[in-house]
């Protein structure tokens, strides 16, 4: 019975490349679609989270982004290696070895060549080993990055829930405290595995259970497969070869992620980037103009007018995206008093609407060429990707032909974090 099982396993391992190729081919397409999912999460966090949590959200999305890039790279690399292996196996069935005696090269040349490349069969076996291990190696790392993302996501969730019932500062401290504890535990566990400590009796008592606990924390539902994959790889590969694999994966992830990174709003989660938007008027940003960006899948995070060139003053409108990080500050700094509780629901609702609009008008000032203008503003959810914001209209607008700019001052963002948006446009009346 054991011989039959062993024979079945050997036959399965010999023929598994067929299933591997099918899986890789489908997964290459599917894994690249996951970038859209991470991008949508970035856009959602951009509009929904308070400003204090943005750095935590940035690292959450960064690790998920790297996990997807690693997954895509592993399937792509596996597909390439297996394709070369299939071609080599087919060639070996026709020409089993490199011939020393041939009409093209001299025996002296071929002797040197065969010392450098001794066996075609050995080369195919090496390709088979790489093809069989590359997926396991990369998936092991993907599980780690997904685990880190889940841990950061849990800390972010608990922090934002705390901020809902207490203060934003306390909620942030909860998130950072949980992440700090996790970092200290991981660093301590790594020290325990050092040559100087790993054989001490007290270390032997706590090192294994602590490692298992950390694996449960990070790998969670993938605990068993992650444990098998990681320990098989780490106990069978010498450190030099292990780090060679790591360097190859880092290079592959950098190439793949670099080609996709610019098509996300990830860096906009950071305050310094968010506050820097639209400060320049010496260049045009396509994201400020609807006709230039209507087809893009990214959420609209820049203030936006219809076009770079306006032919009629009546055409000029402004959509101002309004993320949670600013909206909270607007209501905190608003001089208007929040309406008291009312028995009539409709009356209470209308009072709240009027209060919110009054705060928006007070804390966000819109001008054209440094001149105050008449405008009508309404709360608006953009149909492009349900971006929350404000929609401005400019009745009775009088413009001279030539260059102009819309200036948006965000008064609620004060001090070193001052924010002013500027959108240049050209008015060419027909």
Image (cartoon, helix red, strand yellow):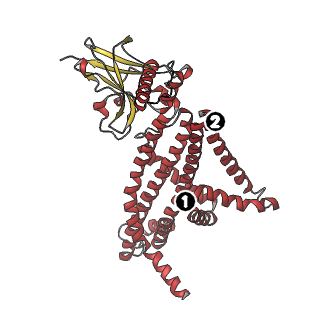
Real-space Cα distance between discs 1 and 2? 35 Å
Left or right: where does residue 370 sit relative to residue 155?
Answer: left
What x and y, as percent, mark residue 226?
Answer: 57, 62
Q: Quadrant of the C terminus?
A: top left
* 402 vs 238: above or below: above
**Residue at point 25% right, 22% down?**
315
Residue 105 visible within the image: no
Tell me where residue 350 sits by quadrant.
Answer: top left
Residue wearing tag 1 = 140
**Residue at point 25% right, 13% down?**
401
* 234 vs 175: above or below: below
Residue wearing tag 2 = 170
Of callouts 1 and 2, which one flags the residue occurring earlier in the amino acid sequence? Answer: 1
Tell me where residue 28 sits by quadrant.
Answer: bottom left
Q: Nearer the viewer, residue 407 or 257?
A: 407
**Residue at point 64% right, 38% down?**
173
Left or right: where does residue 10 sit relative to residue 232?
Answer: left
Q: Nearer the viewer, residue 171 or 257?
A: 171
Secondary structure beneath label 2: helix
Tell me where residue 219 sits by quadrant.
Answer: bottom right
What x and y, as percent, mark residue 91?
Answer: 37, 72
């Amino acid at each position: 019975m054991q011989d039959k099982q062993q024979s079945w396993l050997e036959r399965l391992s010999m023929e598994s490349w067929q299933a591997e190729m099918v899986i890789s081919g489908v997964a290459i397409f599917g894994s690249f679609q996951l970038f859209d999912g991470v991008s949508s999460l970035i856009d959602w966090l951009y509009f929904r989270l308070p400003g204090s949590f943005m750095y935590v959200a940035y690292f959450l999305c960064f690790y998920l982004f790297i996990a997807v890039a690693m997954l895509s790279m592993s399937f792509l690399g596996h597909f390439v290696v297996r394709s070369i292996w299939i071609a080599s196996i087919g060639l070996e069935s026709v020409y089993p070895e490199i011939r020393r005696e041939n009409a093209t090269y001299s025996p002296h040349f071929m002797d040197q060549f065969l010392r450098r490349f001794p066996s075609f069969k050995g080369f195919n076996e090496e390709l088979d080993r790489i093809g069989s291990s590359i997926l396991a190696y990369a998936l092991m790392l993907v599980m780690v990055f997904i685990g880190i993302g889940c841990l950061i996501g849990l800390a972010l969730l608990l922090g934002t829930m705390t901020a809902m019932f207490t203060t934003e500062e306390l909620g942030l401290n909860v998130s950072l405290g949980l992440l700090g504890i996790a970092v200290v535990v991981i660093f301590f566990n790594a020290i325990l595995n050092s040559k100087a400590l790993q054989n001490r009796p007290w270390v032997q008592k706590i090192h294994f259970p602590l490692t298992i606990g950390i694996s449960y924390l990070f790998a969670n539902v993938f605990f068993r497969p992650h444990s098998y994959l990681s320990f098989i790889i780490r106990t069978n590969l010498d450190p030099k070869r292990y780090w060679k694999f790591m360097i190859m994966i880092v290079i592959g992830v950098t190439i793949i992620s670099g080609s996709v990174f610019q098509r996300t709003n990830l860096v906009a989660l950071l305050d310094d980037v968010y506050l820097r938007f639209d400060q320049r008027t010496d260049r045009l940003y396509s994201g400020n103009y609807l006709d230039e960006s209507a087809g893009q899948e990214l959420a609209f995070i820049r203030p936006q007018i219809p076009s770079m060139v306006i032919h009629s003053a009546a055409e000029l409108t402004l959509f101002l995206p309004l993320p949670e990080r600013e909206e909270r500050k607007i209501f905190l700094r608003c001089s208007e008093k929040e309406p008291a509780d009312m028995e009539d629901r409709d009356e209470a609702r209308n009072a709240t609407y009027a209060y919110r609009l009054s705060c928006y008008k007070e804390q966000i000032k819109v001008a054209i060429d440094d001149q105050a203008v008449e405008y009508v503003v309404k709360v608006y959810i953009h149909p492009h990707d349900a971006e929350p914001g404000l929609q401005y209209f400019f009745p009775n607008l009088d413009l001279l032909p030539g260059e102009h700019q819309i200036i948006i001052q965000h008064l609620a963002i004060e001090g070193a974090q001052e924010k002013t948006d500027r959108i240049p446009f050209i008015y060419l009346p027909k």
